[in-house]
Image (spheres, rainbow, N blue to C red):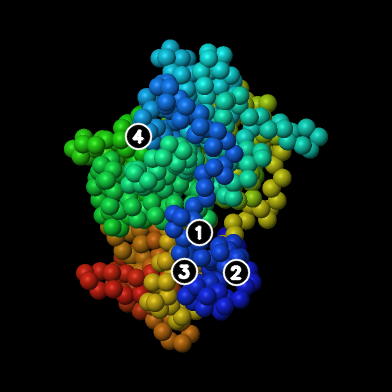
Amino acid sequence: MAKWFVAAKKADFDRIGKTFGISPVTARILRNRGLTQDEEFRRFLYGTTADLYPPEGILGMKEAAELLEQKIREGKRIRVIGDYDADGVCSACILHRGLAGAGAEVDTAIPNRMKDGYGLNEHLVLDAWEAGIDTIVTCDNGIAAGEQIALAKEKGMTVVVTDHHEVPYEESGGEKKYLLPPADVVVDPKQDGDTYPYKGICGAVVAYKLILCLYGKMGLDGEKKDFLDGLLELAAFATVCDVMELLDENRIIVRFGIAHMKHTANEGLRALMEVNGIEPEKLTSYTIGFVLGPCINATGRLDTAVRALRLLEETDRAEAVRIASELKALNDSRKEMTEGFVKQAIEQVENGDLGKDRVLVIFLPDCHESLAGIIAGRVREKYYKPVFVLTRAEDGVKGSGRSIETYHMFEEMTKIKELFTRYGGHKMAAGLSIRSEDVDVFRRRINEVCTLTPQDLEERIHIDVPMPVSYITRSLVDELDRLEPFGNGNPRPLFAQKDLLFLSGRVLGKNGNAVRFTVQDDAGGRWEMVAFGDPSPMNAYMEEKFGKEAVRRLYGTGASSGAFSGRNVEASPQIRLSVTYYPSVNTWKGDSRLQLVMRQYQ
């Protein structure tokens, strides 16, 4: 079971609260997000787009804008080459629309995941050359494409790389030698010597900053403000989908991007919300990350991401709805396929000898390679270990990895880079290609170089405030809503209370995937607490700890586990659990009331 820790960062919470008009509880939560200076608190609570860092602060940005301005004035043909995930598609859309808006003769190309693999490749370079392209601009890729960019240069083409991934390196004598591609300009905040204040931006934000810089140089930023705000929506969308930390300027980009998206003029985004039943006013980082984003990603996984790019650039409403419906259908198909392979992956871990490994390497030869990353993420959640899922490909084996906080996946892979025919990524995720005969070798070697300790493999639940439920008020919930958008780096605030008495429980929903409990604190106050997800694990835990009879009475039925249903009657006061929770407001038929959402229990 995961270990619970109370965040213990110190500060004068009363002073911070008075300075910024928030409660000491909220001040403590913000301190737990790493904020220390008053300016950081101000930017988090009240920051606007005026607080975004100047794009020229990214190394190479000014030179890239100058070069592209020159190409536009000379009428040279430009090709934007993106990637097949949501970040790559949004990046390509931003650059394509932005360059076209500045008068460029520009088109796009996005690699096919199955035929081309990740990022720039020889085929895409030769296609561009044969089409008479003068300048290639990469987005969300290119930093690791040294050979392909060298080919483009041999053919006489200009290349601008815009990326946000880690720069490949060689290590010798404890020192890293970074291997930049031979492009005319490289724009990547991760490159050595870059002094940009915040490195955690996605590829689409790098692309957005390039267009901002270009428009500033060309004097277009004033007259094109609404147009640029539309590009900001796409940068925000990609930031959420690429699971960037929602801190610093990412928070501002996503906050204002979502606010603008609620009234978007982008027919594709409007259609995507419509076919998924999302009311624009209720759009959140959650609905982008878990509903809309997967539809964009599904095209690159099961079909071609060109269709997703067409959706984002579509101006006809009827056509946008048609494409959005196709994307939703593809995503529904992707979800069904994923479930089957997740079961196979878990069976390998449970029934074989993989379980003893600190790094899980799972080979699913018949799995669609595009699903490997999703499956790896699901397996990581279950076992809290770094996970690689490998699949059979035309030219060997391909795979995707998902990591945990204590394991830098890209750096660990670099230790055995001689095994890979291709690899890339960052701390939390990576992609790779290896020879078919090296699957077992990879599993053995990645575990041999692993330095994870048993403590590193214990999931840590960070509690913001150990706070009795009796402290929860509607005004506190409203104040916590000001901390949106929530996501990576800015999780929803988490509170904890020991020994709540569970009085009754009732399973909700046609699939039985939620339970509403009535709980009581030591002062006798009663609260509604909801737990989402399959209730079976919690029921089994309570049965083991308190006995089957106590669980039967809790649910007011004769059943003992699984999906319970029945009357909401009070049980014998036998079940006491410590819980982590966050407060919310449940509105049903115009009636609003406070409720607690349980996250963990013990």
Q: What residue type is labelled 3?
A: Tyr
Which residue has dot 2 on it? Answer: 6
Which residue has dot 4 on it? Answer: 101
Q: What residue type is labelled 2?
A: Val
What's the CA distance linking mark 3 and mark 1? 16 Å
Cβ–Cβ below 8 Å for labels 3 and 1?
A: no
Q: Residue 599 placed where, x, y %? A: 47, 64
Residue at screen point 65% across, 35% down: 413
In this rendering, does residue 183 appear at all?
A: yes
Of the two numbered discs 4 and 2 on the same chain, state the one appearing first in sequence. Answer: 2
Cβ–Cβ below 8 Å for labels 4 and 1?
A: no
What's the CA distance linking mark 1 and mark 2? 16 Å
Circle 3 or circle 1, nearest the eye: 1
Which residue has dot 3 on it? Answer: 581
Q: Using the rendered view, name the quadrant where residue 99 is placed.
A: top left
Of the two numbered discs 1 and 2 on the same chain, state the one appearing first in sequence. Answer: 2
